[in-house]
Amino acid sequence: MRLRLLIGAVVLLAALAAPAAHAATDIRQVRVPISDSSSTPPGTMTLDFVFKNTRADKRRFTPRQLTRIDFAQVPLLCMNAAGTGTSRLLLTRTVQTSVKLAKAPNPAGKKPKPRRFAFRFARDFPEFAGTLRGTIDKANHGPRRLRSQGSLRIAGFDADPDHVNCSTNGLADWSGLPVTRLLQ
């Protein structure tokens, strides 16, 4: 009797410790060139997304989460204290985040087409006045590639005493940029 009880307890512990079958995960990236009107070379904002599939459809991956925002030499215009003029700042910073993407609604009266989708994301930066908004989609026309569009706005970013009240020159918009798969 004790042997059966011991075997039952071991089997139960093994079943509880075994990991459940999960969907596959894929990391994909969007690289956005951001420049200002001056002669400085453009910087890059890189967005990393987690794509997942379902167990029922192993080949169809959809975007689920924005995990990382990387600014590399993004030019900002700084309005310094009165009398000191303006200056330029090249923003280089990585922000780890976990922004869930929401499925965009279908246009009114339109039926969704198979294998087409649109997911939206938005993030407000708590460190400074700034927003990041965008969409990842597969269009209903043209090639069936993933694409991204969106906008970045930075205002009131203070880096140091020589670079205060820095901002992008209006909105930094992008449209139709490819979403590339990272090799793992």
Image (spheres, helix red, strand yellow):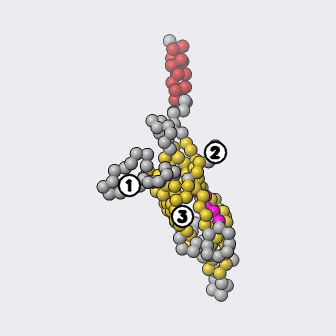
Q: Which residues make up the magenta segment?
A: 43-47
The residue depicted at 51 percent of the width and 14 percent of the height is 4
Single out the residue that lies furthest toward the top: 1
Single out the residue that lies furthest toward the bottom: 83
Q: Which mark is residue 105?
A: 1
Q: First in sequence: mark 3 or mark 1?
A: 1
Q: Nearer the viewer, mark 3 or mark 1?
A: 3
Q: Main secondary structure of the magenta part?
A: strand
Answer yes or no: do the residues labelled 3 and 1 have beta carbons within 8 Å? no
Side of 144 relative to 111 (left or right): right
Measured as percent of width and height from the top left, residue 25 is found at 55, 42
Which amino acid, mark 2? Answer: Leu
Q: Quadrant of the C terminus?
A: top right
Q: Which mark is residue 174?
A: 3
Q: Examine the rendering and report whether any part of residue 126 can be seen.
A: no
112 or 127, nearer to the observer: 112
Mark 3 and mark 1: span between their CA atoms? 21 Å
- Residue 163, magenta (yes or no): no
What is the quadrant of residue 34 in the picture? bottom right
Q: Which mark is residue 143?
A: none
User: Secondary structure beneath disc 2?
Assistant: loop
Answer yes or no: do the residues labelled 1 and 2 have beta carbons within 8 Å? no
Answer yes or no: do the residues labelled 3 and 2 have beta carbons within 8 Å? no
The residue depicted at 69 percent of the width and 77 percent of the height is 162
Mark 3 and mark 2: span between their CA atoms? 24 Å
Per the image, the residue denoted by label 2 is 183
Measured as percent of width and height from the top left, residue 76 is found at 62, 72
Residue 180, above or below 75: above
